[in-house]
Image (cartoon, rainbow, N blue to C red):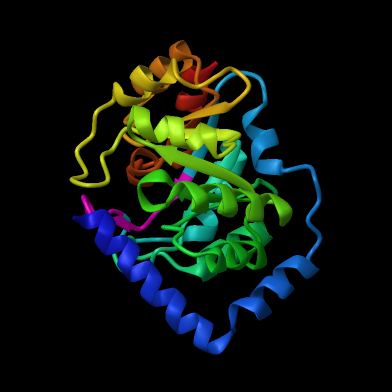
Amino acid sequence: MILEELAAAARARVVQRKKCVPYAQILEQAKALPAGQDFPFAQALRGPGLSLICEVKKASPSKGLIAPDFPYLQIAEDYEKAGAAAVSVLTEPQWFLGSDRYLQEIARKIRLPVLRKDFTVDPYMICEAKLLGASAVLLICALLSDRELRDYRELAASLGLSALVEAHTEEEIRRALASGAEIMGVNNRNLQDFTVDMHAAERLRRLVPSGVLFVSESGVQGTKEVAAARRMGADAVLVGEALMRAPNRCAALRALREAAE
C-alpha cells in the first residue's frame, strides 16, 4: 500500500537525520524560537467565507510529474497575490519530489501562513517544521495511534504550530476529535489506493462540530467543487493539481475565489 510505503520512507529519513542532529537537540532548537499564541494558519481559515489553501506540488504518486517547470517561489507569490489564505508545501522527496528547502524559502518570501505537507511519523518532523518556518503541520489519522495524535498535536501547539488532522472515515473523525483536533481535514482521496470520492467530505462534515475548523482536501478541479464545499459549510478547501496545471495560476485562483464567495 502506498501510504505504508510513504510512512516507511519518512521513518527512514528521520533515522538518518537523527544521526546528524539528535531529537533532544532539534527539540531544544525549536523551543528556542518564538512560539506565539496567534496560530496564523488557523486564523487564516477562520476568515469570512470559504478559504483557499493552495498547494505547491511538483509531483504525486498518482499523477507522476505534475510540474516539470517548477518555479516554486513564483508559484507561492502568485498564490499570495491572487488571494490564497494559506499555502501548502510538499516536502516529501521521493514520490512528491518535495524539499524542505522549498518550504523554508517560501516561508521567508511570502506573508501567508505555510503548511508543511508531509507524512508526519515522528515528533522530530514537527520540530523540523518549526525550524523551517512552517505555521502548521499535517497529522494523518491512518498513520498515527490515538496517543500519537494527541501528543503530536500538543507538541505542535506548544511550538506555536497548528495541526491539520486528516481523516478519511467516520472512525478516523472520531479519533481526531478525541485527540482534541481544532482543524479537521477530510481527504477526498483514499491514500491506500489514491482513488478520489468527492462526496467523502460532504458525508463526514456532519460529524464535525461547528467549533472545529473543517477543510475539504483533494480532488478540486474547478469552481464546481469549490461551490460544493461552500454549500456543505466547509471553512476551507485545499487545492493542488488544478492550480499547478493551470496556464494562468492567478486567473485560475481568482475564479476559485469567486466561487468560494
In this rendering, would 168 be left or right of 52?
A: left
Q: Is residue 120 above or below residue 136?
A: below
Using residue 30 as the reference point, say whether residue 120 is left or right of it.
left
The spot of residue 40 in percent (x, y) is 71, 42
Q: Nearer the viewer, residue 84 or 68?
A: 84
Say if residue 174 shows up in the picture.
Answer: yes
Residue 202 on the magenta span: no
Give the vertical position of 91 relative to 183 (above or below): below
Taking depth in this image into account, of 93 and 210 the one nearest to the observer is 210
Q: Is residue 98 above or below residue 164?
A: below
Taking the spot 45% from the left edge, 11% from the top edge, the residue there is 231
**Can you tell which quarter of the image residue 8 is in?**
bottom left
Between residue 169 and residue 241, name the one nearer to us. Answer: 169
Q: Is residue 65 magenta?
A: yes
Taking the image as drawn, is residue 83 in sight?
A: no
Q: For the view shown, which residue lies furthest in the front direction?
A: 147
Q: Is residue 153 left or right of residue 246?
A: right
**Residue 244, position as x, y percentages in the image:** 37, 46
Residue 154 placement (x, y as % from top left): 65, 50
Residue positioned 39% across, 16% down in the render: 228
Quadrant of the rendered image containing residue 239:
top left
Quarter of the N terminus within the rendering: bottom left
Q: Which residues are magenta?
A: 55-66
Q: Quadrant of the C terminus?
A: top right
Q: Position of residue 186 (x, y in %)?
A: 40, 32
Residue lying furthest bottom in this view?
Answer: 20
